[in-house]
Image (cartoon, rainbow, N blue to C red):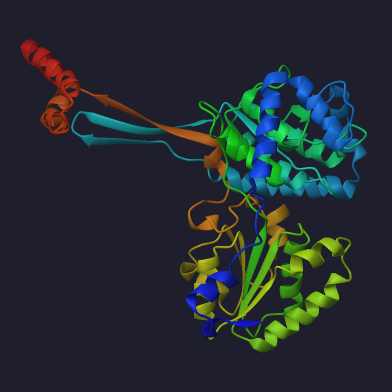
């Protein structure tokens, strides 16, 4: 436990530091080599790298049509229902985000419009690892579906038998995704960015991943005319603000639900009650023993922070400085604190709002800015799957009304052709009057 007010500014910054992300020159070079290999060898590189990294010897990259048939009948009713409940809630929340076009006459005869259109093609990356992630398929797939993206491409690494989880396939089917490729890692990102014989390149790449995937996304986003990416990524994290009235059992479970994501995840508790902090630490130790991913969670707990503040108001200051991916507020009158909590990817208000709800089925998107990027990046939403553009239409009188302003500004900037484009039109219009 660290008392916030007893630390100097440098010590406070150090206390809020994240676990170091893998960002070595070696990692960067490995990823650059993979991207180069995919660029020059296409599908063959993907097949070779999939066998090397995932142990699967494939004859084709795209999932077979037969693997997408009768999925609902193969799932247990409990899992099928869970996926469908999550799908419905996520869809409802994202449908409500659909942007409205606007049309404004800024001056008489000068009409400006803001319009929205879905991205034509999107790449959705779903990590592999120790557990299937149908929830991430839903978060990305529903957003693309509601936005109206014409082409939705899902990439995910296969297991050693060259297969992917039934839950992932069913979630993809609900989202209208029929283009699924059995490829993961940096090579999948390279394929989505550059295209191969089997995989046509996309306009934007979405989804979380390990350090290789993250580095690959950063590198391909710098390719001239390459794809956009959703947001910078880092290890997952949660910060809990709790007062003396909070339930230490709940708080500990929230910290551990984040810790089990990965060994580099971080869980932070900020409270004005030393008694509460000690009770939570005891609960964390007890609950750890019940987890199937105990080893991973134990490693992540090493990065945990327990911060004692002089007041809850000071806890808000700590939270805003940390800018957590997930922020859980377990205090009296939690909703009243929202205006003071300016930096967070997603906020969970009150003791009945665990982070797990947002991860799976409340309806909000669980793809969020991490590593402090919540200060200047937003949580993933429908707008990320769309582009906005402007339209303007001027009548002759409208151009005449603002023509002098345009020409004077062009003169000020020394751009004669800009001035002339207006002057010639006004001369022609005047002659016809």
Find residue 224 and report its horizontal and vertical position in percent.
Answer: 51, 27
Q: Tell me if 264 is positioned left or right of 69 in this view.
A: left
Q: Tell me if 210 is positioned left or right of 344 in this view.
A: right
Of residue 188 and residue 204, the one placed in the foreground of this image is 188
Of residue 158 and residue 95, the one placed in the foreground of this image is 158
Find residue 196 and report its horizontal and vertical position in percent.
Answer: 69, 20
Find residue 274 and report its horizontal and vertical position in percent.
Answer: 65, 87
Kindly identify the residue that appears in the image at 78 percent across and 31 percent down: 183
Residue 26 picture quarter: top right
Q: Can residue 54 be seen at all in this image of the molecule?
A: yes
Q: Tell me if 199 is positioned left or right of 409 in this view.
A: right
Of residue 75 and residue 250, the one placed in the foreground of this image is 250
Count of numbered labels shown in the rendering: 0
Kindly identify the residue that appears in the image at 59 percent across and 36 percent down: 219
Quarter of the figure that contains the C terminus: top left
Q: Can residue 142 be seen at all in this image of the molecule?
A: no
Kindly identify the residue that appears in the image at 65 percent across and 70 percent down: 268
Residue 287 picture quarter: bottom right
């Amino acid at each position: 436990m660290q008392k916030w007010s007893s630390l100097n500014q440098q010590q406070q910054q150090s206390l809020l530091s994240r676990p170091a992300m893998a960002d070595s020159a070696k990692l960067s070079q490995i990823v650059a080599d993979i991207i180069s290999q995919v660029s020059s060898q296409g599908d063959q590189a993907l097949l070779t790298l999939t066998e090397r990294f995932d142990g699967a010897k494939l004859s084709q990259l795209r999932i077979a049509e037969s693997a997408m048939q009768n999925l609902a009948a193969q799932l247990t009713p409990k899992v099928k229902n869970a996926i469908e409940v999550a799908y419905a809630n996520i869809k409802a929340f994202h449908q409500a985000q659909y942007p409205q076009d606007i049309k404004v006459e800024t001056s008489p005869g000068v009409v400006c419009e803001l319009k929205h259109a879905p991205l034509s093609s999107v790449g959705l990356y779903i990590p592999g690892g120790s557990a299937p992630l149908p929830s991430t398929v839903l978060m990305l797939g529903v957003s693309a579906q509601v936005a109206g993206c014409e082409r939705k491409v899902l990439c995910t690494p296969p297991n050693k038998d060259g297969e992917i989880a039934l839950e992932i396939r069913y979630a993809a089917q609900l989202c209208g995704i029929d283009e699924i490729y059995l490829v993961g890692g940096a090579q999948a990102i390279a394929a989505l960015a550059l295209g191969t014989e089997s995989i046509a390149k996309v306009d934007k790449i979405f989804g979380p991943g390990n350090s290789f995937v993250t580095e690959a996304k950063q590198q391909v986003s710098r390719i001239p005319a390459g794809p956009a990416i959703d947001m910078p990524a880092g290890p997952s994290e949660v910060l809990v603000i709790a007062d003396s009235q909070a339930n230490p059992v709940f708080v500990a479970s929230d910290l551990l639900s984040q810790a089990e994501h990965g060994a580099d995840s971080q869980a932070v508790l900020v409270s004005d009650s030393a008694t509460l902090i000690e009770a939570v630490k005891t609960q964390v130790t007890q609950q750890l023993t019940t987890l199937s991913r105990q080893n991973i969670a134990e490693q992540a707990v090493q990065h945990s922070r327990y911060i004692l503040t002089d007041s809850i108001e000071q806890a808000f200051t700590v939270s805003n400085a940390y800018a957590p991916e997930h922020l859980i507020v377990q205090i009296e009158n939690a909703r009243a604190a929202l205006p003071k909590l300016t930096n967070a990817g997603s906020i969970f208000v009150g003791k009945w709002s665990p982070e797990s709800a947002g991860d799976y089925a409340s309806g909000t998107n669980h793809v969020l800015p991490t590593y402090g990027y919540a200060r200047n990046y937003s949580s993933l939403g429908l707008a990320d799957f769309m582009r906005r553009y402007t339209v303007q239409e001027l009548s002759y009188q409208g151009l005449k009304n603002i023509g002098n302003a345009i020409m004077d500004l062009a003169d000020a900037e020394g751009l004669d052709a800009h001035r002339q484009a207006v002057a010639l039109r006004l001369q022609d219009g005047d002659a016809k009057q």
